[in-house]
Amino acid sequence: MALRAAVIFSTTCFLLGALFTHWIADSLTLWKSGPVTDENLWTAALYYSILARAPSFVFFFLGTVVLVGGLSILSNLRDGAAGNLMFDGGSILLFGSTVAHYLYSVIPIMLSQFTALSTKKFETPFPNSLRTATLDLASTHLMCSVALTGVLVLQAAHVWADRSDAEAAAAELRRDADKQSASD
């Protein structure tokens, strides 16, 4: 259990860190009190175009981390305990929704909109079709970050609940041992 929990925490934290690095671009398009400027959108789009053109081994590495994390959460379910079903079931739902958002929203947008983006277009007005894609990427990154934070919270609660159960069982054994020694 401890090894699986460590793997789940590590992979989830790594993926959260990878998403947090996108805040450089996402902060330019989200949480603005005024209108989002073309300069902000171009900066975010250029950041995404760098990501879209990253070497393929980076994507394979991220895919491996996702696979290890997902398999670790799934392997916790085979114990069949009620706590595992509740905490790990919720974690699987959140982790799976993150993977689904990334597979069906982020990756297609990145590959279709940002792989051929040129840095020379920076002086032109920002196109509306690219505006929607840039804003969609930023909001999807935020949703994925919140979902992965939920995985961390559920897994921390799972570890805490298991520890509490183990402490209660140990206290019960001590009481039984004390009763046994008192009756002898």
Image (cartoon, helix red, strand yellow):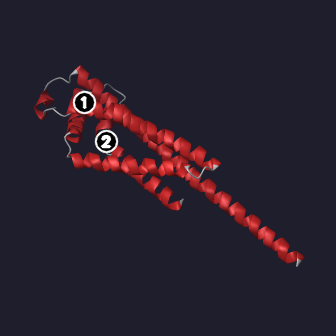
Which one is earlier in the sequence, the residue at label 2 or at label 1?
2
In this view, the residue farthest toward the top is 128
Q: Is residue 113 left or right of residue 156?
A: left
Relative vertical location of residue 31 with respect to residue 64 in this rendering, above or below: above
Q: What amino acid type should be assigned to the residue bearing mark 2?
A: His
Percent across and percent down for residue 147 are: 46, 40
Percent across and percent down for residue 134 are: 28, 29
Please tell me which residue is depicted at 39% across the width and 34% down the height of the picture: 101
Element at label 2: loop
Query: Which numbered disc covers residue 72?
Result: none
Percent across and percent down for residue 15 are: 38, 48
Q: Is residue 110 left or right of residue 6?
A: left
In this view, the residue in front, 146 or 36, is 146
Q: What amino acid type should be assigned to the residue bearing mark 1?
A: Leu
Please tell me which residue is depicted at 30% across the width and 50% down the height of the picture: 61
Residue topped by disc 1: 41
In this view, the residue farthest toward the left is 120
Q: In front: mark 2 or mark 1? A: 2
Quadrant where the image shows the C terminus? bottom right
How many discs appear?
A: 2
Q: Residues within 10 Å of mark 1 (few under 14, many from 20)?
A: many
Calculate the distance from the C-alpha at mark 2 to the C-alpha at mark 1.
14 Å
Please tell me which residue is depicted at 25% across the width and 27% down the height of the picture: 37
Relative vertical location of residue 25 with respect to residue 71 in this rendering, above or below: above
Query: Which numbered disc covers residue 22?
Result: 2
Tell me if label 2 and label 1 are in contact, CB under 8 Å: no
| Residue 44 visible in the current orientation | yes
In this view, the residue in front, 115 or 142, is 115
| Residue 147 visible in the current orientation | no
Q: Residues within 10 Å of mark 2 (few under 14, many from 20)?
A: some
